[in-house]
Amino acid sequence: MRSVSGGSSYTTSIFIPLGVYMLSESSPVSLSTRHIVSASGRGFCSEIAGRCGGWIYPVSRSIPNPQTRDRVLARRALIHRVESKERRGRVVGSLAVLLSIAVLGSTWVGLFAFLGGSAANGTFQDVKSEWIPETEEMDLTLPQLSAVSRIYAGSGEMLAQLHDGRNSKPVEYEEIPQVLVDAVLAAEDDDFFEHDGWDPEATAAAMRDTLQGTLRGGSTVTQQVVKNAFVGSDITLKRKVNELFVSLEVEREFSKEDILGYYLNSVYFGAGAYGVKAAAEEFYDKDLEDITLAEAATLAVMIRNPGIYNPRQNPEDVRARRDNTVLADMEDSGWISAAERKAAADTRLGVVEQEDEDVAVSNHVVAAARSELLSNPEFSFLGETLADRKRMIFGCPANDTECSGGGGLTIETTVDMELQEDAQDILADWFPLFDYNERIDACTESLGEGESSEFIAEYVENQTCQVTGALSMVDNETGAIKVMASAIPFEFNQFDLALQARRNPGSSFKPFALVAALQSGITLGTRYDGSSPQSFTCEGPCSPSGNQWTVRNAGSSYGNITLEQATYNSVNTVYAQVGLEVGPSKVADAARSMGIRSPLTEVPSIVLGTSAVTTLEMASAFSNFATNGVWAEPYLISKITDRDGTILYEKQVQPKQTIDPAIAAAARRPLLVVPVSGTGPKANIGRPQGGKTGTHQNFTDAWFVGFTPEYSTAVWVGNSNAQEPMTGVTINGETYSRVYGGDVGAPIWAEFMTIATEGMPEEDFPDEPEDIGEFVRPPLTTVPNVVGLDSGSAAAELEAAGLNASISEAPSREPEGIVVGQEYAGGAQVEEGTTVTITVSNGEVPSGSMPDLVGLTQDEALAVLGDFQNNAGIRIEVFGREVPVDEPNQVGIVLAQTPSAGAAVNEGDRVVLDIGVGPGNDDGDDGDNG
């Protein structure tokens, strides 16, 4: 809205849903208020000193005579060029956007009011440098058709022709029929020739939703061009701001025709067709100039979402939108008459049958390969700048008459298309895409009743609000990506769940903590308290409660168990202790060294999988366990040759030892138990394998990551658009009260890996290194002296030392329950987990039956009495009495005993033995000799 006054200044008010920002322009101008009706009849602008500038707002509607169309179009283009020239050098739009960021981010509120003039200017410059992208190198030129680049699967199938053939056939803007231009603008951006590249209200709403993690539409054609060509589609505020600023720059630097021409040549229509020419051939087998009004309107419908508005699969939906929206808007804008609209609406869709059945399966692969070629530094030989790479891959720009060469590349990928199709089929069986009404119901429940039905209807065009899944597989030896499958078809949503979606791995992250523990001197035999729940005090904040962290097991509560047992039983309380003992940074370091590249938050709960990762990362990192720690970087593109067959690039696999081989082999041991008797028996495929289940908090994500000697594969299950609890959900015909990784991820893994390994010879894992013992055997511990303690205290002390207590009872004068003996003396060194037997008094006075000692030598008799005392658990007093004898063979022999043999002997009783001595030893004393 613009206020008009007599002479010196004017003020522009930019209306955004979250507030009104008043921006002043102080340059003196003389104003007149002659309104100019736009060609679409939807707006006006005030002519200021012979120029038309500022923001355009709809205030009236006037349908121009169709016969004046060419004149109006020319006037419209002229106005745009004048406005674009006037806007050069102005920062009004930029400042408005920065203020929008301030409000939306809740970070800069009051900032400029607080700071002084120079400080505010400095802050503005800092924010500008941080948020506003460099736009000087932008290139919207189209690839030349003279050279075709082809992408092939590792199994030999051609996946796509890049910007040629049926994939894309760019044409000059002037070659596109006006009826098709009008139809697309009616469907996507009917104010295209009036706006400045963005819709303030829709953009602010989209930014707000981006902050909330929600994807909203509402982009202009210019913003769609910028998103697809320059800034990507990440759901982040910075990306949305980048998109906005680049859109403003694009509008300043290029004509509307250039922007619209690029859009019409690159927009996706489905079935692998990019651009209007490819779409006309794919769906109607026609040249552009032969497309009718009805056909143009049908093609325009598909752009919004090729998966939903697929005329071959959902003809009723496509026809309804064509007749009631696109054709209606074209009539409202004066681009067609009522009679033309009726005639077109009465025409059937008439699309031809699709020829290529496999295009949907390969599109995720093609998109990933294309992204690699354009952005990965490894392919810098294709060009230092994005424009150079585009020319090398797709051919020369169409408007560059001096350019030659470019394109004609043969690009080979690593993907096995047969396995890729198998994975897609399995995921589609487990997670069939909801139909429109099911998505409406699911998203209404997911987003809440507060959202309008109009927003929900738009939201479900590319969001499912349903449980879905993804699967990635790599070759353990080379790192080659063999499968990257997503349950959501590319036609519906181009976001790749396998390579791009980061989700919390839950307990499937524990093996990295296990490696860190082994690196820190802990062994598989180290024992921990497995009871549940347990509360821990952290050095810093580690939970919403501050430094208090309460951890529960998903299943049972355990006693004193080894780290190995805690791994294959996935005991959370044990791994919480491990994480605190080792430290979060060492766990993160182990994960990074093994191939995790996503950002990791170094907090104690990292051991339970609180940092989000992709299925590709997890599959790649788990390959370390299959190879004794030898890891190869995952890669998708294996070879590139030019049109003459010259090899431009060939992947040189360079495996490296990421962790100690003995540690990798030791960590593998409990993972081999998981599919046999641990938490993942549904993953068992009857051949050498290992793996780990994972279930994130509140059942939002479920995983199974496993490996055979040949391949490592990760399966993720969850909601694609948000982390929502998977409770009370039905998957593949079965209802789950709670979804665990072992319930769904494991059987999907088994179903796919059974196919992947079919017919392969059964191999085993590499031999374990000789020094594995130091990481496997229990550590030594000191036996405490527990004699004199009560049995409970003694057992507790032994368990605290990592020992098991075995109790036996015996008569003793000590009170009942007191330890009177132990198997290993206090201070002895034994392995953790050793069982120590302790003898406890039963409260009974000990007694025994006197042994027969007559005829034994004195030494023999004393030895027998010693054994008697030990066995009976009593103490007796022994006295010897010398008796003179004449026979030499009776000297030193027990001649008699008191008590006699067989008599009862009690604790403290006296035993007297008569020992024969020679005559010379008689001293005449008949008393006892003690």
Image (cartoon, rainbow, N blue to C red):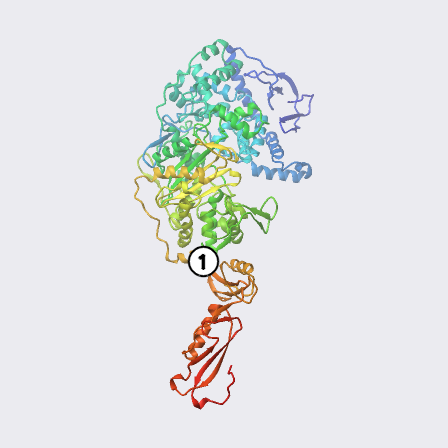
- Vertical relation: 886 (above or below) 304: below
- Vertical relation: 340 (above or below) 531: above
Q: Position of residue 712 (x, y in %)?
A: 39, 43
Q: Is residue 341 visible?
A: yes
Q: Nearer the viewer, residue 379 or 471?
A: 471
Q: Position of residue 852 (x, y in %)?
A: 43, 74
Q: Position of residue 689 (x, y in %)?
A: 37, 45
Q: Quadrant of residue 796?
A: bottom right
Q: How many callouts does the rendering have?
A: 1
* Secondary structure at numbered mark 1: loop
Q: Nearer the viewer, residue 612 or 23?
A: 612
Q: Quadrant of residue 387?
A: top left
Q: Residue furthest top?
A: 339
Residue designated by label 1: 778
State left or right for residue 548 relative to residue 717: right
Q: Is residue 781 visible?
A: no
Instruction: Indicate the amino acid at tag 1.
Output: Pro
Q: Nearer the viewer, residue 392 or 199?
A: 199
Q: Position of residue 858 (x, y in %)?
A: 43, 80
- Vertical relation: 896 (above or below) 764: below
Q: Residues within 10 Å of mark 1 (few under 14, many from 20)?
A: many
| Quadrant in which the N terminus is drawn | top right
